[in-house]
Image (spheres, rainbow, N blue to C red):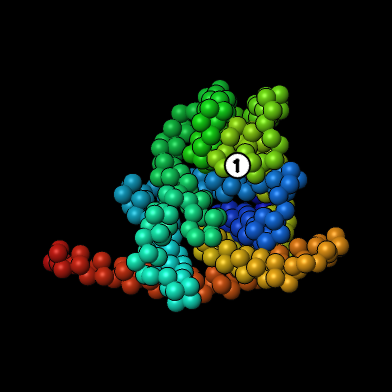
């Protein structure tokens, strides 16, 4: 993404990156998850909108490239606080809700509840699914990429243009035989490390490589529905995402900055950027509530297209505001819980190693 015409502040923080982060979070939680989580529109057309995760990992790489260098243990601790702690707070709160529902309303036993919960991997951050919140598949992948970003940052200065082209080709070949998140999204995170820095590779050559990969996929019968190629991402999803971003990422960046000029939207884009992961973790509750409500209200009715379109727009607007207010409250809860345990850890540490 380009880094021109900064809209506010002259601080060392890259404000444009916050704009991209906020816009991408709005797009994911209010539009994309409205299509798939509320309306259940799974088609080739809607699947072509699934370029968000590559952008998210590009932004992760860009953020790391601009961060002040830290020792690896300090870096790991900060990643843990920002990713692992919020995830397990979500696990704890969701477990309490389901415990009450199943043991009080459905008359299940507490022992059976926790046994089935453990067997289903709810407490394993790498399980990728928490109850009905299937969107948390993203968390373990994001954590793994965060852990290897320092390694990618180390090798980046040693890469020239041919090496970058070779990485794109090798990643594509690997994803033919071993579709996986780390290779796919790790490549986009590596691309993000070149944010606001000289790029040795020509993006049009990179686009040509991805275009050739897509042609190969078409010749070999790959489905054009990206949702079917995304879990885990294979060469088709990787090539499509790479082609779109290598050609249109600068234009997407300019669009985000143009939207940010609107004073009303500016305020909310800033809020989505600040709340970040908290919005992502908890917005699914809003999606679930709206989805169940629409299923109840529209059951048995054959609604015309204009009504479906009106519902689609309305639910996106509702999600836009509901996500903010829910996330602001949950952010306070997260801070309170993290501060509580941090104080306990500090007291234990001071007891074991008292300050002289």
Say which element carries label 1.
loop
- Residue extending farthest bottom: 104
- Identified at 55% across, 55% down, the residue is 135
Instruction: Left or right? Give the position of 196 relative to 34.
Output: left
- Whether residue 160 sits left or right of residue 95 in the image: it is right
Image x and y of residue 10, in percent: 57, 59
Q: Image height check: is 138 above or below 39?
A: above
Q: In this picture, is 106 found above or below 5?
A: below
Where is residue 34 shown, x and y percent of the image? 68, 60
**Residue 107 in the image, given as x and y percentages of width and height:** 44, 74
Name the residue beneath numbered marker 1: 230
- Quarter where residue 241 is shown: top right
Task: Report how many numbered discs are placed on residues in the image.
Answer: 1
The residue lying toward the viewer, choosing from 277 and 260, is 277
Residue drawn 35% across the image and 50% down it: 76
Quarter the N terminus occupies = top right
**Which residue corresponds to the image point at 46% horizontal and 71% vertical from the top-left?**
102
Q: Is residue 317 visible?
A: no
* Nearer to us in this view, 101 or 234: 101
Q: Position of residue 203 (x, y in %)?
A: 65, 32
- Which quadrant holds residue 301? bottom right
Which residue is found at the position 49% from the left and 28% from the top? Answer: 159
Is residue 58 or residue 292 the one in the foreground? Answer: 292
- Residue 30's image quarter? bottom right
């Amino acid at each position: 993404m380009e880094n021109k015409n900064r809209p506010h502040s002259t601080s060392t923080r890259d404000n444009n990156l916050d704009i991209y982060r906020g816009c991408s979070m709005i797009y994911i939680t209010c539009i994309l998850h409205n299509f798939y989580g509320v309306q259940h529109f799974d088609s080739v057309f809607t699947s072509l909108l699934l370029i968000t995760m590559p952008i998210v990992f590009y932004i992760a790489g860009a953020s790391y490239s601009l961060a002040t260098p830290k020792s690896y243990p300090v870096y790991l601790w900060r990643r843990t606080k920002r990713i692992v702690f919020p995830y397990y707070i979500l696990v704890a709160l969701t477990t309490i809700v389901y415990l009450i529902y199943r043991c009080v309303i459905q008359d299940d036993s507490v022992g059976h509840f926790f046994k089935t919960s453990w067997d289903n991997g709810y407490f394993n951050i790498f399980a990728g699914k928490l109850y009905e919140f299937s969107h948390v598949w993203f968390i373990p992948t994001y954590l793994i990429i965060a852990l290897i970003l320092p390694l990618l940052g180390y090798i980046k200065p040693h890469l020239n243009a041919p090496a970058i082209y070779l990485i794109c080709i090798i990643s594509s070949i690997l994803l033919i035989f071993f579709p996986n998140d780390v290779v796919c999204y790790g490549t986009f995170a590596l691309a993000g490390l070149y944010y606001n820095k000289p790029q040795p590779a020509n993006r049009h050559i990179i686009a040509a490589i991805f275009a050739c990969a897509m042609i190969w996929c078409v010749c070999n019968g790959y489905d054009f529905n990206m949702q079917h190629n995304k879990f885990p991402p294979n060469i088709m999803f990787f090539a499509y995402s790479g082609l779109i971003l290598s050609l249109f990422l600068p234009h997407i960046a300019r669009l985000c900055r143009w939207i940010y000029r609107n004073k009303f939207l500016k305020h909310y884009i800033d809020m989505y950027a600040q709340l970040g992961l908290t919005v992502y973790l908890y917005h699914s509750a809003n999606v679930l509530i709206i989805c169940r409500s629409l299923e109840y209200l529209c059951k048995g009715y054959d609604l015309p297209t204009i009504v479906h379109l009106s519902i689609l727009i309305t639910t996106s607007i509702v999600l836009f505001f509901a996500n903010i207010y829910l996330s602001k409250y949950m952010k306070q809860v997260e801070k309170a819980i993290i501060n509580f345990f941090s104080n306990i850890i500090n007291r234990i540490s001071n007891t074991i190693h008292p300050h002289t």
